Image (cartoon, grey):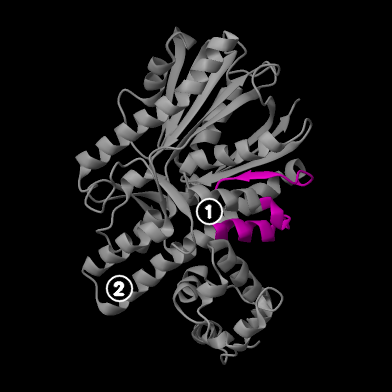
Amino acid sequence: MKTFFADKTEPEVLERFADTPATELLEESIDVVEFIVYLEDELGTRIDANKVGPALANMNFGQVAGELAKLVNKEPDVNS
Amino acid sequence: LRKALPRYINDLYTASVGESWTNPRLLPYFEEAVERLPLQDEPRRELRDFIRYQMLGERVRRTAVPNWKPATLSDFNSRASAFERGAEEAIAALARPIKETAENSGVKFDAVLTTTSTGNLMPGLSYRMAQRLGLAVRPDSLLFDLANVGCTGSCKALNLARSLDDSFQNILVVAVELPTTLIDMTGTNIDLWQGNCTFGDGAAALWISNNPEQGSLALEIEEIRYQQFAEKGLELIRWGYRNYYNFALADQATFENDVGKYVSGALREVEASWRDVPQWAIHAAGITLLMRVARSLNFPKEAIRASADHYRDHSNMSSVSILFVLKELAEKASAGTAINLLSMGAGFNVVYGRVRRAR
């Protein structure tokens, strides 16, 4: 997840990435959709935007990683 | 119906109706309403999280409902009356520049074709527009109201205008959509709330003729292709009924899968028409859908930019949205530039079209 923001985010924010509210980096709905599409490419699976979207609007990235792991049955890894 | 001469969009008029509401201004009302719903803790949290997701960012919509507050729209009468007042405001705003154009150029409209799916009026919009335009509409002009056609209504009206025979020299197409008169904060369904969060009000009109020298745009209507999927797509988008009509969808997974499949499939059938045209005016149905369709067909990312910008600035205005996007693109286009049109909506149906600036 972190890689998606690497080129467009301050290093200090990336250092505390897991604790960063997703809405701090995803300000508009198109940002969220672009991020979900990126995750689909990385994970190689279709993601239900109506399940992950609410998580992104209400959680930090650490928690989002947990939600994603449940959806794709993998161990959460916020840095991947 | 017979078409012989090419048809041109000579001018495109848009009207912003009512009051502007940003997501941050509206969200507290929605959250307060969710707290009052008869829900257990977990479904209440799920609904609240979904709404926050839908209301992310600074997106704007306009509402024709005056002094809007949660209790403003409480029954059939308040909603239908708000629609009628808003429609009158929209028609008046559109009529001013159209009447001026008609007077300056000596144009009389042979037909006035109107569309709305977000309210019912009698007399219809076409009569109300004719009244506002006075001498620009003859007593024997065709006045025709399309209804119940969903978000593709303006494209269907455009296609109808294109199909009329050459005796109809100047045609006015008018779309008025006021979906915020449907906002209902007393229900618990996700799709009802998706409608609450997604839509905004607006109106637009097209002056169409077979003379490219008239007006400011001269967009030749080169192609309009229409595909309906009524056999399997009837349930995808439809009205629900509470104390008024409300937006209802098939379950989310079916909706996402089927809509994406129908839109992509319809576009593949006409790929030769759009593949080399980079500009797209797409109905602002939802960013996720647009992004998925664009990816499945290998559109450049920029293809959905104008529609995404429109959604941020105006939200989904149903059949009016595509006309706002088209205006934005057409005014910047140089002579010879083509623009693809794509709309999709209840039925289910998909409309593809292509216009080109003739001068």
Q: Is residue B160 above or below residue B310?
A: above
Q: Is residue B31 above or below residue B152?
A: below
Q: Which residues are magenta?
A: B275-303
Q: Chain of mark 2?
A: B
Q: Is residue B358 magenta?
A: no
Real-space Cα distance between discs 1 and 2? 27 Å
- Residue B79 shown left or right of residue B322 in the figure: left
Q: Nearer the viewer, residue B209 or A19?
A: A19
Residue depicted at 39% across the width and 54% down the height: B195
The residue at which mark 2 appears reads as B44
Residue type at the position of mark 2: Arg
Residue B113 % position (x, y): 48, 23
What SS does tag 2 mark?
helix
Identify the image quadrant of residue A25. bottom right
Dots 1 and 2 on the same chain: yes
- Residue B170 shown left or right of residue A67 in the figure: right
Residue type at the position of mark 1: Arg
The residue at which mark 1 appears reads as B312
Residue depicted at 73% across the width and 36% down the height: B333
Disc on the earlier residue, 1 or 2: 2
Residue depicted at 49% across the width and 71% down the height: A53
Q: Chain of mark 1?
A: B
Question: In front: mark 1 or mark 2?
Answer: 1
Residue A17 % position (x, y): 58, 85
**Residue B117, disc:** none
Circle 2: is it few (<14), some (14-19), or many (20+) Cα within 10 Å? some
Identify the image quadrant of residue B225. top right
Residue depicted at 32% across the width and 44% down the height: B181
What SS does tag 1 mark?
helix
Decide if residue B161 is in sight here: yes
